[in-house]
Image: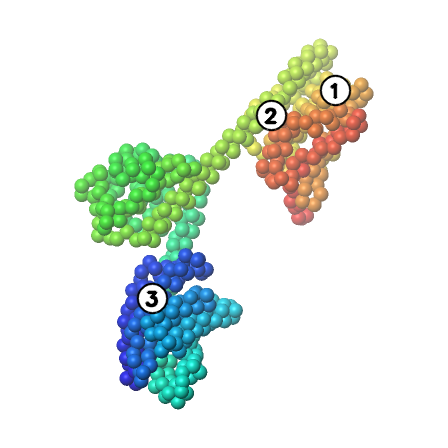
Amino acid sequence: MDLTISLLRQLSVFLVIAYLFSKSPAFKPLTEKNLQPKSKLLLFAIFTGFSVLGIYTELPVEGAIANTGAIGAVLAGLIGGPVLGSAVGGTAALHLFILKGNSALVYVVSTGVAGLFGGLANIYLLRQNKPDQVFSPKAAFLATFGAEALQMLIILMMKNPFSEAWALVKVIALPMMIANPIGSALFMSMMRDQKSMFDKVGALFSAKAFNIADRSLGILSKGFNAESAKQLAEIIYDETGVGAVSISDGKKILAYIGIGDDHHLPGLDIVSPQTLEAVRDNKVIFADGVHEHFQCAISDSCQLGSALIVPLRVENEVVGTIKLYEPKNKLFLNLNKTLGEGIAKLLGEQLLRDRYRTQRNLLVKSELKLIQAQVNPHFLFNALNTIIAIVRNDPEQARSLLRHLSNFFRKNLKRSGDLSSLEEELDHVNSYLVIERARFGDRLQVIEEIDPELLQIKIPTFTLQPIVENAVKHGISNLLDAGVIKISAGHSRDRAIIAVEDNAGCFCDKLDGDGLGMNIVDKRIKNLYGNQYGIQTECVPDQVTRVALVLPFEERESK
């Protein structure tokens, strides 16, 4: 009993150190699900220190020793696996051998084996799909109890004579098999509680970050301005619970909410040296209120005492700052510091996406303008000459052609959206073809085979007209006999196929070239729907040219 009490007394010192360790930054590697090599190296040093400390606090018993050195090795193996456990146990055993020599060979072997035993316990729990049990006090108790029982067996096997070994085991077995497992269980209990706290903090952080991301989604699509900044500041203030939140661009305050809102007014120029430094040097400034104080540059009576100033970056360009403040009587939490930096990164990515979206819209508009500019100027001259020739003999047809010409160019000039319906595209093409039929007469026939179900399908604007124009310009105009253009639209499973076909077969070499209009149409379809869609072409010289637009299609359930 006295030996048990003495070992427990030694363990109290050991547990105080363990408690301090659990509160230190060195404990953080234990919270990782998969220990990295750097973390394992740190844990090796820490647990080796615990084992060596247990050796130095040994208790002499009838010419032998009783100590707590096995605890560090067993726990290292239980947490980090057999390699880490064996490394800690082996290092502690080597240290003991250097101190005691051959006289302590039994304890050298048993200390080394203890780490391996803890590692085997780790493997067992993982194979049983119980990784959470690694930090269980019960698992620590049983693993250390098993290691101590194995140590007693090693003493009986290696120490001579057997009678002395048996006498020693009877004295130290029970105390060591009670005190050391209890110490391991208490140690692991501290580790588990601290790990649970880290997990809860991590879960809280994740929840706050998710809420901010969810609530702020789409706000910056309206632009980075006073209105969007105010909405974002309110969300951040609500989710973080800090004393105040400010959002600024590179020169002035866009939004401010919280303590000090009577003098930190939106629209004021930035005068804080720390904010100016953050913008100028593109770096995070953290005045924690302890090592570095925040001093308001606007009012001497300001209650703010600490601040986190994070640059808002877009492609490494500082476009503004996000600032979180706490009053002088409150500590700035590390959670909010990490969260603030994460918020800035999140909003920076949203701004980058918005910038990309804006540039993409500009590109689409440029492409539309380019397609509009591709309309052959000769078409206008030919159309006007045709109308002039008809106007004397058939004024009514001339008026109809003028209406179609007006309709064609009006839609050419006014259509700026990215998508339009197939019905709208066909109406635009029809105005073009009416004029061309008047010019070519019987030499141009147009056949339409359109599935009514596809009339409302959305396709990129100005997709059909360039292809029909190519069929007339490079196909029908080269024929002496009657030319036929067939426009069809149908679907097969999940794909819509809109085709323009002519009976000239004069466009084969152009299809293999780099025609600007065709390339733009193909690229726009692929950008919108994916590379599996786009333009498919077929050509048999002097017989047929077929250009098909392949688009996604969702069949509607029949009513």
Judging depth in this view, the residue of 67 and 452 nearest the camera is 67
Distance (Cα) linking label 3 and label 2: 75 Å
Judging depth in this view, the residue of 101 and 440 nearest the camera is 101
Label 1 near label 2: C-beta < 8 Å? no
Q: Name the residue beneath numbered marker 3.
A: 49
Q: How is the image coloured?
A: rainbow
Instruction: Check disc 2: other Cα within 10 Å, few if <14, some if 14-19, many if 20+.
Output: many
Residue 304 appears in the rendering: no
In percent of the image, x 37 and y 36: which residue is there?
A: 318
Q: Name the residue beneath numbered marker 1.
A: 477
Q: Earlier in the sequence, mark 1 or mark 3?
A: 3
In percent of the image, x 68 and y 24: which residue is there?
A: 469
Vertical arrangement, residue 259 with respect to residue 414, above or below: below
| Spot occupied by residue 135 in the image (x, y as percentages of width and height) | 41, 68
| Spot occupied by residue 435 in the image (x, y as percentages of width and height) | 69, 20
Q: Name the residue beneath numbered marker 2.
A: 371
Q: Earlier in the sequence, mark 2 or mark 1?
A: 2
Label 2 near label 3: C-beta < 8 Å? no
Badge nearest the viewer, 1 or 3: 3
Quick one: which residue is furthest to the left in this view?
301
Badge 2 element: helix
Distance (Cα) linking label 2 and label 1: 21 Å
Which numbered marker is on residue 124? none
Give the amino acid at mark 1: Ser
